[in-house]
Image (cartoon, coloured by chain):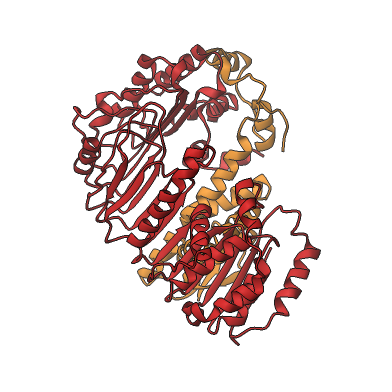
Amino acid sequence: MDRLSELPESILLHILSFLNMRDVVRTAILSKRWSHLWTIVQQVDFDLKDFFPYQNFVDFVNRTLLCRGNCKITRLRIGLFLNASSRKDYVGWIMYATKNNVEELFLDFDSDCCEWLPPPCVYSNSSLKTLRLLSCRLVPAMQIRWNLLTKLTLRFSVLWDDIIRKIMVGAPKLEFFELDTCWGYNDPTFDSPSLRVLIVCDDESGVYEHGPVMRISAPNVQFLRLSGSLYRKCVLMNMPSVVQATLDFHPYTHSDKQKEDLKWKQDNLMELVGCLQHVESLTLGSWCIEVLALREKRRMPCQISTYKCVTLSAYMTEYDLLGTVNLLKGSPALQTLIIDMQSVLYDWRRRAMEYSCNSNVEDYLASQAKHIRCLRHLKTVKLTKFVEQHSVFPFVEFILKNGSVLENLVIIARRGSEENSPESLLKVAQRLLSMPRASSRAVITLLN
Amino acid sequence: MVKLKSNDDKEFEVEEAAVIQSEMIKNMIEDGCATSVIPLPNIDSKTLIKVIEYLNKHINMGKAAETGEEDDLKEFDEQFVNMGWEELFDVIMAANYLNIHELMELCCQSAADRLKNKSVRAVREMLKITNDLTEEEEQEIINDAPWAFEGPEIDDTVN
């Protein structure tokens, strides 16, 4: 029996909406019932990588769009390589989509040091809700009108402060803005009243000049994520509404110059952490914890914060413990600590640091207990992607022994890891259960 | 607790917090139409058990994102859709009828993943589709877009 004949057409179309157009077109010869579905599917995804040579791709896209006529298109994604593509082709496709009131447009144009200029219909569009542009250059002379746009992602693109200002005015419903490895801006102001989520990954360009400082202002943003190589100083100007923040910088450290620069980058990171003391939830990447560890070694205290939840990407080496302790000492109100464990470290620079860190971990942690005030508030500690490595057990032992109101210790084992065989997890469980607990309410959960 | 009855007359009790992930039942509860048992004439007990399993696991979706339990949910989802085509279609129909958005997305994504890069012959066999096109009709479509039908990545296996 043809099971599919029972499924209504709307569901078949929904299944097809998850496939790229090349897979969708093949369904045309399954049976008569299917032969027209490919022309009316509303979510359309073309990718050059399925075609060779380029002209086959162009013929395929043109023919598909022609067969669709003016059928409603809600989502269009085009993946192509800019250096090998012709402007008149992709501009035609974009115009087709905007003329048919496309709502989600993903233009994944990869490139090798070249940019494309979007046509006017991209700048001024009253149907778009989601827009993603790669390798493009937005020009200030164009007026931006995105009445319905809520989500915008720009990647490997060039835009000036001026254009960001225009986006803030021209997209009154914008809620989510991601700038991933873009260039041209120095003092971006993200002051749209509707903007809630801001993600900025700032990285150097071989081509574009940049100012020595980036000053970000985002008065209404609640979720902030900053990453990149911290190649220039980053300053937060106006961030009163942030509730959740993530800092995940990874500076380059290969050349001697880059090593010298580390000093100001470390200071810059601490300034950023200082500007975000008021957030409820902070997430730090592995380099940031390294900086805190360095401060702990030099007996420099962490700034006092009001974080309720902290998430750390850590290897759980002795060095990471220093950084974790440094942060905990500065977070007296902390209730939830999540450690997202990273896989074993192969970074030689880090290895060298680890060697310099030869105190006894247990003794060190015990000596710090009285300075960590949040041990009296900490309710939940969670280790995700757990593998038994480095100093993870001394740390867990320390938390159980000193967390006087601890309610939950949750350990989620890393999947597909050789170390986490059923036998070794059983041993982990036995070891955890044998540890003394300060809180009689503490429940230990080990998930595989 | 809300009581649901499958089309083979089996009753199931589900927590309200779980069952309101179904827009249809949520509306019924809000309109005060869910005081006794809710009959589900389109869903058999085998499928309903699967759907309830999903609802119970996803009961606190928003909270999971906060506490980093997304990995756990992701793993559950992966296991959940590990089922045969017929069962998958039954769950899709149920999710569609009950209007459970996340479950619908999960199952349709899984169906699409199974069709990705598959040859026409393989898809026909997997979905038990009888080809009622003539050879000429078929060839005509292929001639229009030959590149869609050939290539090293096209997979002729059925699994």
Establish if A75 lies above or below A317: above
Spot the residue most to the bottom. Answer: A440
Quarter of the rendering containing residue A144: top left
Pinpoint residue A155: horizontal percent, then vertical percent: 40, 35
Which chain: orange? B
Q: Which one is nearer the viewer's eye here, B49 or A260?
A: A260
Which residue is at 67% across, 52% downward?
A: A344
Which residue is at 25% across, 39% downward?
A: A164
Pinpoint residue A287: horizontal percent, then vertical percent: 51, 52
Spot the residue most to the right. Answer: A423
Quarter of the rendering containing residue B70: bottom right
Pinpoint residue A204: horizontal percent, then vertical percent: 41, 35
Q: Which one is nearer the viewer's eye here, A402 or A210?
A: A210
Which chain: red? A
Which residue is at 57% across, 25% downward?
A: A26
**In the displayed structure image, the side of residue A184 where residue A66 appears, left or right:** right
Which residue is at 55% across, 76% downward?
A: A368
Establish if A336 lies above or below A19: below
**In the displayed structure image, the side of residue A266 where residue B123 appears, left or right:** right
Residue B19 in view here: no
**In the displayed structure image, the side of residue B126 where residue A225 appears, left or right:** left
Q: Which one is nearer the viewer's eye here, A242 or B111?
A: A242
Pinpoint residue B10: horizontal percent, then vertical percent: 61, 68
Q: In which quarter of the image is the C terminus of chain B?
A: top right
